[in-house]
Amino acid sequence: MNTRQQSKLIYSWYGKRLSSDRKLRTSHYEGILITSESSKTETCIQLGDFILVEGVNADQPYVAQLVDLYEDGAQHKRAVVQWFCRLEEIPQNKRKLLKREISAQEVFFDQVLGYDTDIAAETIIKSTMVLPLHLGEELPIITLNKEQTFYVRQSWDGKCFKVLSLDTFSKLKEANKKRGVITNSSKAFIPSDILTPVKKETESVVRSATKPKNADMEIESKHSTSKSSLAKERHSQRVANNDIKTPTARKKLELNSPTRSKGRLLGCEVLGLLDDDYDAIAPFKPSATKRKVKFTSEISGSPPKIPCSNDKSKLTSETSECRQRSSDIILSPYTKVKDFSEKDNNLHEKDDILPLVGYQKPSSQIPVLTPRSRRTCAQKTSALIAEQISMLDEEDFLSSSDSSYSSSSEEEDDDDDMPCTPEKKPKSSRIFSTPNSSRKSAVHTPAKTLKKTVRFHITPRTPRNATPEIPRRIQAAQEPASVLEEARLRLHVSAIPESLPCREEEFQDIYNFVESKLIDGTGGCMYISGVPGTGKTATVHEVIRCLQQAAENEELPPFQFVEINGMKLTDPHQAYVQILEFLTGQKVTATHAAVLLAKLFSTPGPKRKTTVLIVDELDLLWTRKQNVMYNLFDWPTQKHSKLIILAIANTMDLPERIMMNRVASRLGLTRMSFQPYTYKQLQQIVSSRLKGVKAFEEDAVQLVSRKVAALSGDARRCLDICRRATEICELARQKRAPEIVRMAHVTEAIDEMFSSPYVNAIRNASLHEQIFLKAILAEFRRAGVEEATVQEIYRHYVALCRVEGLQSPTVSEIMAICSRLGACRLLLVEASNKYLHMRVRLNLSQDDVMYALREE
Amino acid sequence: MSKRKLKESNAESAECISQVQKILRERFCHPCAAGKLFGMEQQYRHLLELLKRTTVHGESNSALIIGPRGSGKTALLNHVLKDLREMNQVRENLLEVHLNGNCQFFMKNPFLPGLLQTNDKVALKEITRQLQLENVVGDKVFGSFAENLAFLLEALRKGDRTSSCPILFVLDEFDLFVHHKNQTLLYNLFDISQSAQTPVTVIGLTCRQDILELLEKRVKSRFSHRQIYLMNSFDFKQYIKIFKKQLSLPAEFPDETFAQKWNNNVQHLSEDKTVQDVLQNLFHHTKDLRSLHLLLMLAGSAVSVHHPLLTATDLQEASRQHSTDSKANIVHGLSVLEICLIIAMKHLNEVYDGEPFNFQMVYNEFQKFIQRKAHSMYNFEKPVVMKAFEHLLQLELVKPLERPSVRAQREYLLMKLLLDSSQIMDALQVYPNCPTDVKQWAASSLSWL
């Protein structure tokens, strides 16, 4: 692929060396030249310019001001920057400190100390604009380059927002002025310029002198907006370079950054390539000329589909055919678009709506209008039919309107035109906003649906913006009234105790591990094992809580905390999706997420915090190739990953048992195992929860602890038994007299939970069922094999009935008894179609059956 | 005059009879909706307390109701829910989600149709739909499995004990959920019930006694081990009482005199020796109330205008119908040739001690009988006998050991007889117009000597 070469960039110094330091062997420069090899263009960025820097999320590059440029001893080009932070980078809980709406274009002067201001010069993408504004000032209306211009009003120091000091304000102003004079290649950045539509076109061409590839594309399909495509392109390029492991990555990327492939496809080349690239390109090429191309390929490629309503429409063959074609074209790429729009859901959610109207807006209408005018004749007739049909079945009509809504909302989003929006989305949606509603019935023509789009626009019922929420309860929950109720509340497993007794050592070990890694800014893995109910997850959560506390008090560097649970994933690969969503808020497919994460953890991120990742139920992330586990444990070993993984599972020897050598070796040897609780520990756990509430006899707690410790050492079980005992106690007490849980109650609860149901079930079975079991025993004894057919058992059965003086039942009744016992799983039976030859086994030991039957 | 009076009373009693039939039908066909609970007061109290705590205090719980089929698990739950809904503090404070693990089994619930969750994916969509979360459009849930799971878990995680509406999950045929992949759904439900999230109570209904052994260790640890066992643990006296209660008419029956008469008759029946024998017999076979309902249904259908009150013979007749052997019934309808083939097979079974046989062997046995003994039987040709044999195959009185393949000749396919010799002898006793020599042959294969 020549696409990679196309966007290969060369960084070189601009101007002469300002100063150099012999000792450190650094030399400082006044500017840097970014040369795109293929397009033969150069961009010059000088000190004091505002720049975009590659970030975690490719759609949202970081904003910064260039402060210094130098070359270090190892001949690496470095840059020192002053950061600006976007709203998304500010923690959720601090955002409300602002008390005002923030547009996507507003950034904050960053005074957080933790960030690394020394970055590699290669991460600079391009220059941009940052305009200082006073607090009350309105955003200036700029119809052009919105995505290139940011505004700064306040500064952010990690705790609160402040108004820009006069000093910084003037500095920023100055930097802008200087910039306007020096850079001649970026005239388009002149703010608050009101331009006529005609001028806009030319302007955009001029502006794109720095990146002519994009300009080509823009001219070619005028409506399309090239958003921060350069960033996107670079990002994906980086990904492609780094990750060759996944073969699908490249293909994906092409879809994501179609500008490159578009640039190549000119003229007749398009025709040739359309066949194979059709799916990928079609959604992005809505211009009239492209439509024509598609037309021809459609006709030659596939036979025209006959719409179902053909018989109804008394059309001339010509018009109907015309209509067919048009609907064909519209229908085919629909699914593709949907995929993309789903991916970007989260972007929609985040963005505030800007009232500005982009210069793209009028041109975006063009592709919709052009095809319309081209088939007016077909459209008129089909619109008529559509009307008839919509009257015929309102349901279909409504459902199509539903879908048309979703498309219209996308259109709305387009108008926002944020720089963070990946360009694939608006383009695709812009084209298909109209035809995608016509998928239900081919008869709904674009013209018709266009009207509907407007009409049904009001019913806002899209599932994708849904907030996950359970309805509130109507009456308030009652607070515990009595001692027993209070005790029950505290004994519930969900109640979070202030401290975790009996896990102090483990807590300290894990805490020290994570803390040391945090301070060093490195990554690492820890494997934690233990049987269920030994407090693994609880301890880890407690550690995280303490660390977060420490980070808030600025004793530790801040970190991000992500948790995934193997049991809560539908598929091991979904782990990538969840991690990425936690980190960046993007929603993408699993394979894409894996690529993005690999990129994220393998490249140095200047502003990135350390990530603490908890992987619960690790064994469920097992796949045949184990690539999920491999990746998870490989990332922390990367130099810049800053990733700490705490993996939790049940079995101690999981790495040796199910992991391949290369995975197990990456997991490392930092392991910890949680021993089952001893009875003393269990006792301590219960009594620490019951501190201050006199609800249990001391001996009763001890009995429970001993019983559970002997069986499993599962703290959950212990708490459950205690809770059940309080209920029994409450039921048993007659008056309102205060009562505490005694031995008898606890014994009853234990019996209830641990008693085998089989014996009781057999004792309560009907007489004939019991005789049947006896017959089975007799047959087993006779044959010496623990399996018999019904026919054999039947003989014994008849004999036993004779002894008991009962009327011997018919075979049908025997079969009924047998299947009843089989349903309860007292017996294991074969499929019943073998009738008398069905084989029967006991599901419990013969001794148990004998014991249960003898008692009577 | 007297004739008209008779007609009037006839019309009146017809009205009564149809009323009676309606009441009985309702009782026997919808036991969950209308029936009373018998012998499960303790379990009722346990479950009621459990659910009340969930709704009132927002306490999360999980419980299993275990009992053999027809022991009233669903009836118990429905009763508790009905009583809960009548309580003031509970009403509208509980969201219910009903899931059914089985494909064939439909829930008889007035407000929810039968639910068919065969895997976690479907179950999850159903949960989301029933909770009416915000990603539900109309009645449908879109999005992928992973998205839906993440959405639901997020929704449940956001809630807390004091402010969110408690949710009751009812998992009917719980044992089928156990077979879902990784038991993801169960793990998540139980995990929520054991953590400080939206209060949920998970109630599972199952008839398997070994259900706890099927749970994965992590799932089992999160289950709070409350098991409510329904065992049909009543004795015969209570059984008679249930019989009386199920048959007698309620006090609000419109025609009081008729109700009086009917109830007296029921009382009388319950003391009758033959009726008690019938009931005793049924009680010995099975204690579940569904079979009692079936018996009473059969008996009750005999009630008509001319036969307004139940008699002991009705019950006896019903009991006879109830306990007839289905395969023996089929034998009654066979031709003499087919009977002969079955007898031949019976002899083969005796000679070869239950080893499988093929058609040729049966034919040879039949030929021996025809040549040496039979006087009344016509010597049928082989294809005719084959035809008769295939009819038996279709009736599933014989069953091939393996699937018939194209290559194997039909005569030599190995077969097994699905009838016991005692069944054959019993059936022959009542077979109409059975030739004597056939009967003799049936009694002993050596009788021709």
Image (cartoon, rainbow, N blue to C red):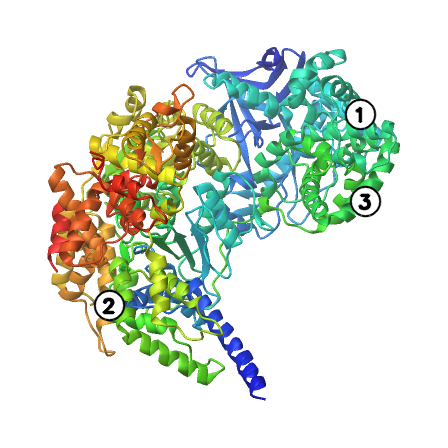
Quadrant position of residue A24: top left
Amino acid at dot 3: Glu
In the rendering, which numbered label is found on residue B236? 2
Residue at 23 percent of width and 35 percent of height: B448
Quadrant position of residue A688: bottom left
Amino acid at dot 2: Phe
Residue at 78 percent of width and 37 percent of height: A445
Image side of residue A846 versus residue A736, left or right: left
Whole-angstrom CA distance, mark 2 to mark 1, is 87 Å
In the rendering, which numbered label is found on residue A288? 1
CB of mark 2 within 8 Å of CB of mark 1? no
Nearer to me, B12 or A215: B12
Q: Residues within 10 Å of mark 2 (few under 14, many from 20)?
A: some
Which subunit holds the residue at mark 2? B
Residue B394 at what x, y percent from top left?
42, 36
Q: Residues within 10 Å of mark 3 (few under 14, many from 20)?
A: some
Amino acid at dot 1: Ala
- Say which element carries label 1: helix
Which subunit holds the residue at mark 1? A
Residue at label 3? Answer: A387
Image side of residue B288 versus residue A362, left or right: left
Which subunit holds the residue at mark 3? A
Residue B164 at what x, y percent from top left?
45, 59
Q: Nearer the viewer, mark 2 or mark 1?
A: 2
Give the position of the N terminus of chain A as an image quadrant.
Answer: top right
Residue A692 at what x, y percent from top left?
22, 65
Give the position of the C terminus of chain A as an image quadrant.
Answer: bottom left
Residue at 22 percent of width and 50 percent of height: A715
Question: Does any portion of residue A556 appear in the rendered image?
Answer: no
Residue A327 at what x, y percent from top left?
76, 31
> Is residue B193 placed above or below B41 in the rendered structure?
above
Outermost residue toward the front in this view: B375
